[in-house]
């Protein structure tokens, strides 16, 4: 078989991915084997591959490929999330480009455009994952709005409603004015921003007196319905029971008392705007205040906004401040740092808004999920454990989940209204069931579909994805089907800590509610991918490389290695393209090592040399020891450490030591027994490396010999620790004795380098203090050091270079015939010059009376020792030079 001189990832990757797909290696069906299941964190259908996806999916692919090699029934379910807010925004923007306004369309017409968009762009990210080598079961590809998954979502909504856990309530919610929908508390990101504190004067009715309040949002005065003072604040006792006049709109509002007011903040007086602040709403309810909503759904001002109607809230803030100042209402402004809530999806500043919404009661639902992660049994384990504290904080302070969204793209809430009253609705899985329930509730058997109107809102996207590990196996609609019983609970979940609550916690909640079992056993939380300046990678900063370009430049295997070598669980990855270059270099080194082995001529009649026999025995022990280390790393989800262990095994132990030990002499053949053993060793190396570098390893595997599809590396048998293992006395002795032999060989090589002795020239080696040491490795030392003999002596060897290994001293006799005299003289003269310069510096310091009299005694002692050591070194160098003259 012709082996190319260079490894070409561009040719190799497509070839083997197509081969794997053709032979259906990624597909899983229920059988008698132990299942190993991963469900992909479904990326947004709007998404394209970025560095976070690359890291997350590489880790999943490593886990699934390793399980496949271990003989497990590996099932990795891929799919995408419909991402209500992001997708609807994309579709609206596309329609706008075509001159179409969403508001001019019916829901059905809009959804037709949305599905068209999904079919055109929705599969991009999954196709890109294939470039990375992701071995997903593509036949199982799911989408959170597939009919079966949507049916599951609706079924769960109805069930939770019937259990009394879902209710409709008029609440203050987080409103995204750009997406024009409500958000849950968890979808609001709070940012510290610099703004202003505006001090405004309100006239007191029937008096020349004024009262001053401080606000960060002067535009909201138009919705004020009270001024509040603390009843214990003596400064304002005289205002009790009076009324104030709202500036500009001249509306009279009561002055109320409540201990809620912080007497230390601002002026001690508080403006109350129940429609636009959650705390103000509580005050408003308590004191039965009027509620005036001044905003439209896009956060522009409505008719209550006077002459500012139709203008954006931030434009109004500037303009109303100017007007208030001109009319004498603005006393002063101060710079003020404020926490501002922003939408996770659109980045728009959130507006608190009163609205009828659907909520899910969480207090009881979370209890099994808290116990699962934080209980003694730790049924669900987080890696690393530091995230348990974050989990605890969220779960123990949970609030009811706002699950309705004012969107069309998503599962429509299955509530059907038959009247104008707030309670005039029924909840059902379909219209037929709704008609039946409505007839029963009203006693009106003539009610028909035309009399019912379905709630226009859609469900929160997370209300779909929290069912993901169950719904992808149809475990909600058909809870006893063979797939859900076989594949659930899944094994590992790999995701980012930023969605620990959004998704991970909610899946655990749903798992215990609907299967009375955890959805997965282990949660591996990756770090965030950051640039060299520790900044989070993002489109806005322009610091995120093109993932596909990286694969093109460095190969998928190179990128995978580059990402994983610096990706400890839970720790942020400081990404540098040099890491990918390192991965590419590793691939090239392995390829060249393989070509070296395949280039050896094999002689069936040659006996196996002793050096090869003992070298292979050592490598078996070393491989088993590293295999145990790899197993330990995987059990703790230290994939970076596992890869580094394999990296060192292949680059150091295999390429630099074993192959040097067994390789034949120049232009000499290798014996068949050794060659066969080296190939077996190579194959085992490829097996442990395959999960990390699937393309390169499959290419080499297929080049080693002709293989059938049944013999492909992707389904080969993963190595298991053999008879010789880490705890075996023989193995420990063998590894320790070779470590000593390595030091001896390194010492010989250092002498050769320092004394300019060509490796072509044989040398002798003498050893003192070898009592009790076996000569087991002498043949290897002789081969790798080009040593003609190793002899024990009782005393030092004169005229020889020496080195130590632990308590043993070794001597290499130096002959003028074996060294490059001119090069050695030049080197010794350079060393002499450095030593004499160093000595001058020390003696200058010691001749300085101020230094000697002021320095601590131990410092003087150390300097005098440096002086004597340097003098001895100079004498040694001069003696060496004299011997060369």
Image (cartoon, rainbow, N blue to C red):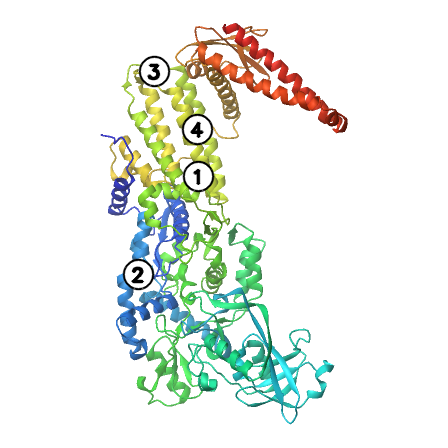
Q: Secondary structure at mark 4?
A: helix
Of marks 4 and 2, which one's residue comes earlier in the chain? 2
Q: Residue at x 51, y 30 (%)?
A: 726
From this viewpoint, is residue 28 visible? no
Of marks 3 and 2, which one's residue comes earlier in the chain? 2
User: In the rendered image, which quarter contains the N terminus?
Assistant: top left
Residues at marks 1 and 4, CA–CA distance in whole angstroms: 14 Å
Name the residue nearer the viewer: 305 or 742. Answer: 305
Q: Which mark is residue 652?
A: 4
- Numbered marks: total: 4
Whether residues under marks 3 and 4 lie with C-beta atoms below 8 angstroms apart, the answer is no
Name the residue nearer the viewer: 66 or 870. Answer: 870
Counting from the top left corner in percent of width and height, residue 38 is at 40, 52
Q: Is residue 493 above or below residue 460?
A: above
Counting from the top left corner in percent of width and height, residue 691 is at 38, 41
Q: Which residue is mark 2?
A: 122
Residues at marks 4 and 2, CA–CA distance in whole angstroms: 45 Å
Whether residues under marks 1 and 4 lie with C-beta atoms below 8 angstroms apart, the answer is no
Of marks 1 and 4, which one's residue comes earlier in the chain? 1
């Amino acid at each position: 078989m012709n082996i190319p001189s260079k490894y070409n990832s561009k040719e190799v990757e497509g070839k083997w991915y197509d081969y794997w797909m053709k032979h259906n290696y990624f597909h899983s069906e229920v059988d008698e084997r132990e299942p190993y299941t991963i469900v992909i964190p479904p990326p947004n259908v709007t998404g394209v591959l970025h560095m976070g996806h690359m890291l997350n999916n590489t880790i999943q692919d490593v886990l699934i490929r390793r399980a496949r090699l271990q003989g497990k029934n590996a099932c990795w379910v891929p799919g995408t999330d419909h991402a209500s807010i992001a997708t609807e925004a994309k579709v609206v923007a596309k329609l706008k480009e075509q001159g179409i306004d969403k508001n001019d369309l019916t829901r059905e017409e809009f959804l037709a455009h949305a599905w068209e968009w999904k079919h055109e762009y929705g599969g991009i990210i999954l196709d890109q994952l294939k470039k990375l080598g992701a071995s997903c079961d593509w036949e199982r590809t799911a989408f959170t709005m597939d009919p079966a998954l949507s049916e599951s979502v609706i079924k769960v909504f109805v069930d939770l409603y019937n259990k009394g856990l879902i209710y409709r309530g008029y609440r203050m919610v987080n409103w995204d004015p750009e997406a024009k929908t409500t958000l849950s508390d968890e979808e609001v990101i709070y940012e510290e921003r610099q703004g202003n504190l505006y001090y405004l004067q309100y006239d007191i009715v029937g008096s020349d007196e004024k009262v001053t309040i401080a606000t960060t949002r002067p535009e909201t005065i138009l919705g004020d319905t009270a001024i509040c003072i603390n009843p214990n604040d003596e400064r304002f006792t005289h205002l009790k029971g009076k009324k104030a006049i709202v500036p500009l709109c001249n509306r009279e509002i009561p002055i109320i008392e409540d201990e809620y007011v912080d007497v230390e903040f601002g002026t001690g007086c508080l403006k109350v705007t129940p429609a636009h602040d959650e705390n103000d709403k509580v005050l408003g309810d308590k004191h039965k205040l009027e509620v005036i909503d001044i905003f439209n759904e896009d956060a522009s001002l409505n008719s209550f906004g006077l002459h500012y109607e139709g203008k954006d809230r931030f434009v109004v803030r500037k303009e109303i401040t100017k007007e208030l100042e001109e009319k004498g209402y603005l006393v002063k402004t101060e710079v003020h740092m404020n926490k501002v809530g922003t939408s996770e999806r659109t980045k728009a500043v959130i507006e608190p808004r009163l609205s009828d919404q659907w909520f899910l009661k969480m207090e009881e639902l979370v209890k099994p999920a808290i116990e699962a992660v934080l209980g003694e049994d730790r049924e669900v384990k987080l890696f690393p454990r530091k995230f348990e504290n974050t989990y605890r904080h969220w779960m123990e302070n949970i609030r009811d989940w706002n699950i309705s969204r004012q969107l069309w793209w998503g599962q429509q809430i299955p509530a059907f209204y038959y009247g104008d009253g707030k309670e005039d609705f029924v909840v059902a899985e379909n219209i037929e069931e709704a008609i039946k329930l409505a007839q029963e509730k009203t006693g009106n058997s003539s009610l028909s579909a035309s009399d019912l109107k379905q709630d226009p809102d859609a469900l929160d996207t997370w209300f779909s994805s929290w069912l993901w590990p169950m719904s992808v196996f149809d475990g909600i609609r058909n809870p006893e089907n063979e797939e859900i019983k076989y594949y659930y609970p899944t094994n590992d979940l790999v995701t980012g800590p930023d969605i620990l609550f959004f998704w991970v916690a909610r899946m655990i909640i749903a798992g215990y509610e609907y299967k009375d079992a955890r959805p997965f056993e282990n949660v591996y939380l990756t770090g965030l991918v950051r640039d060299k300046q520790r900044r989070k990678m993002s489109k806005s900063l322009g610091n995120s490389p093109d993932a596909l370009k990286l694969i093109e430049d460095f190969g998928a295997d190179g990128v995978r290695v580059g990402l994983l070598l610096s990706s400890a669980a839970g720790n942020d990855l400081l990404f540098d393209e040099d890491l990918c270059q390192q991965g590419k270099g590793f691939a090239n080194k392995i390829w060249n090592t393989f070509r070296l082995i395949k280039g050896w001529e094999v002689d069936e009649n040659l006996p196996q040399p002793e050096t090869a026999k003992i070298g292979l025995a050592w490598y078996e022990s070393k491989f088993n020891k590293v295999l145990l280390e790899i197993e330990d790393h995987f059990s703790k989800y230290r994939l970076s450490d596992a890869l580094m262990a394999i990296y060192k095994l292949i680059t150091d132990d295999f390429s630099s030591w074993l192959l040097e030990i067994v390789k034949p002499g120049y232009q000499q053949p290798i014996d068949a027994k050794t060659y066969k053993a080296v190939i077996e060793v190579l194959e085992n190396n490829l097996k442990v490396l395959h999960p990390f570098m699937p393309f390169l390893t499959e290419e080499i595997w297929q080049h080693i010999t002709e293989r059938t599809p049944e013999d492909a590396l992707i389904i080969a048998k993963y190595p298991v620790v053999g008879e010789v293992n880490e705890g075996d006395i023989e193995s420990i002795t063998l590894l320790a004795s070779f470590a000593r032999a390595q030091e001896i060989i390194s010492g010989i090589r250092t002498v050769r380098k320092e004394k300019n002795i060509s490796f072509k020239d044989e040398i002798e080696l003498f050893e003192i203090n070898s009592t009790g040491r076996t000569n087991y490795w002498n043949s290897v030392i002789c081969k790798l050091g080009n040593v003609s003999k190793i002899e024990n002596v009782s005393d030092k060897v004169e005229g020889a270079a020496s080195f130590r290994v632990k308590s043993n001293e070794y001597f290499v006799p130096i002959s003028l015939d074996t060294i490059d005299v001119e090069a050695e003289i030049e080197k010794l003269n350079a060393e002499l010059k450095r030593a004499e310069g160093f000595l001058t510096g020390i003696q200058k310091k010691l001749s300085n009376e101020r230094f000697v009299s002021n320095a601590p005694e131990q410092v003087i002692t150390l300097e005098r020792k440096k002086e004597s050591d340097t003098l001895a070194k100079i004498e040694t160098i001069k003696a060496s030079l004299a011997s060369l003259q």
